[in-house]
Image (spheres, rainbow, N blue to C red):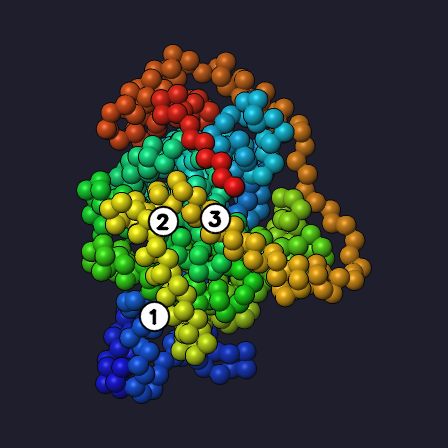
Amino acid sequence: MDAERVEAGRARWQARFDGARKREAEFRTLSGIDVEPVYGPEGADPRLERIGWPGEYPFTRGLHPTGYRGKAWTIRQFAGFGNARQTNERYKMILGAGGGGLSVAFDMPTLMGRDSDDPRSLGEVGHCGVAIDSALDMDLLFDGIPLGDTTTSMTISGPAVPIFCMYVVAAERQGVPVGKLNGTLQTDIFKEYIAQKEWLFAPEPHLRLIGDLMEFCAAEIPAYKPLSVSGYHIREAGSTAAQELAFTLADGFGYVELGLSRGLDVDVFAPGLSFFFDAHIDFFEEIAKFRAARRIWARWLRDVYGAKTDKAQWLRFHTQTAGVSLTAQQPYNNVVRTAVEALAAVLGGTNSLHTNALDEVLALPSAKAAEIALRTQQVLMEETEIVNVADPLGGSWYVEALTDRLEAEAEAIFTRIREMGSDGTMTSGILRGIEDGWFMSEIAEAAFDYQRKLEKGEKRIVGVNCHTASIDEPLEILRVSHEVEREQNRVLAERRAGRDQAAVDAALAAMVQVARGEGNMIPAMLDAARAEATLGEICDALRDEWGVYLEPARF
């Protein structure tokens, strides 16, 4: 790119920057040196067309011209354990300590669409997240937390839509206009078949529910993001950075195709798609991955799917530091790992961030460990001055080369996925890849390769296969009492006894009737939630109608 075009680009950025809102702060180094809001080439630079300027297509350097000078990332700590009242106390602690939003972790029965008193829930209630059986649990979960003023992310996919309906009902009971709600629902069923394995039905009924949710949110809750396409679980299952990038964005393209198949305007529904990535321990590779993700998404949305507005081309993403990088050995090393991973996420331009607690490899976080995880983000935000300059590593020969390399690897994977399908669409290729076990085998091969290198000592983990001497003492970890399950089941029995059973039965029957046709299922499911139908009852009614999905055995 010649010098004249470089200067024209700088002028465009400057105009956007001047017109944008900025934080009231002093933008200097610790020693008092003034820093510019962005840095770029002084003369011609052939790379600039691919790198661009912050807030400008292809958004490699970030979505906003101000970077974090406009608004720092949202501190969104993932939390949930025991019952709704216990988790509500943790949420109030997080918000009171400076957290900017909430992120709900659900227990395994909830993730699988089962009630707490289901025999298959025995021993699991409240252990890996909070137990939610009905809308009344949602009332308790957010008691004293105004949902109209608090952004809430919910990490759940299989039964995401009924859980969303219970959340909406809880907001209604607070008196919050539904149109004011803001937050994110994961709802990403593709990654369940690819990596996490928490589904209820075959792919097609799930996609029908997701399409209904996209339509409902586009019409009724414009700020709410009904899909958070997740690469986190793909990476945690053992994928490489390039596989995480490619599989995640391919899933996102599949959901774009779903919206278009519903007749939705891409410029209306695409801003409601968000992403969720892993920040792993390879510092520069992770930064490059985030930058490549923004660039790829913008190009595909514009050139393949016809998005015309910047907002429809933006890739907004949440990041969580890598749980798989944590070790039970010498667990205080995990504080360092998490800080490095969080720094990579921020330098890559994340929009919100969760930092793992040092004890999460052993149990749900204790209050002390959760506070350290929160303070890790606050130290980065308040003390390091990394919020002063947009994309400070932009133009680095190494980072730009890694960004280009990851982009090229992702594009090769997109081609492979589309070739697997019957009609050249990404959706068709994803469904075929799920059916054939292709995604699973690719991840398994990458995980095996890493484990082999670890066992040979080619990859080193401090405290595990090197520097193993330690003076550590056992950690005090959070333990969820079996009394939580007993109490949850007692309360659930009381709710069932006290509700209008005829209203519940009628609402469930009406929901199934809609499922048999082509209407949008969200209003009927909301009615079931308002009647206090339980999560298990809603999901079982649909299991009876649609059947369940069992993954074929593969060796």
Relative to 53, is 122 on the left or the right? Answer: right
The residue beneath circle 1 is 54
Identity, as a three-letter code, of the amino acid under mark 1: Pro
Identify residue for label 2.
251
Residue at 66% x, 27% y: name it: 483
Q: Compared to 255, does 43 lie above or below?
A: below
The answer to whether the residues at label 1 and label 3 have Cβ atoms under 8 Å apart is no
Q: Is residue 487 left or right of residue 432?
A: right
Residue found at the far top of this picture: 502
User: Which residue lies at the image location 38% right of the left edge and 45% below the top edge?
Assistant: 433
Earlier sequence position, callout 1 versus callout 2: 1
Q: Is residue 265 visible?
A: yes
Q: Which residue is mark 3?
A: 441
Residues 553 and 223: in front is: 553
Contact between labelled residues 2 and 1, with CB atoms less than 8 Å apart: no
Using a 10 Å C-alpha cutoff, classify the residue at mark 1 as few (fewer than 14 neighbours), some (14 to 19) or many (20 or more). many
Amino acid under disc 2: Asp
> Extreme front residue here?
555
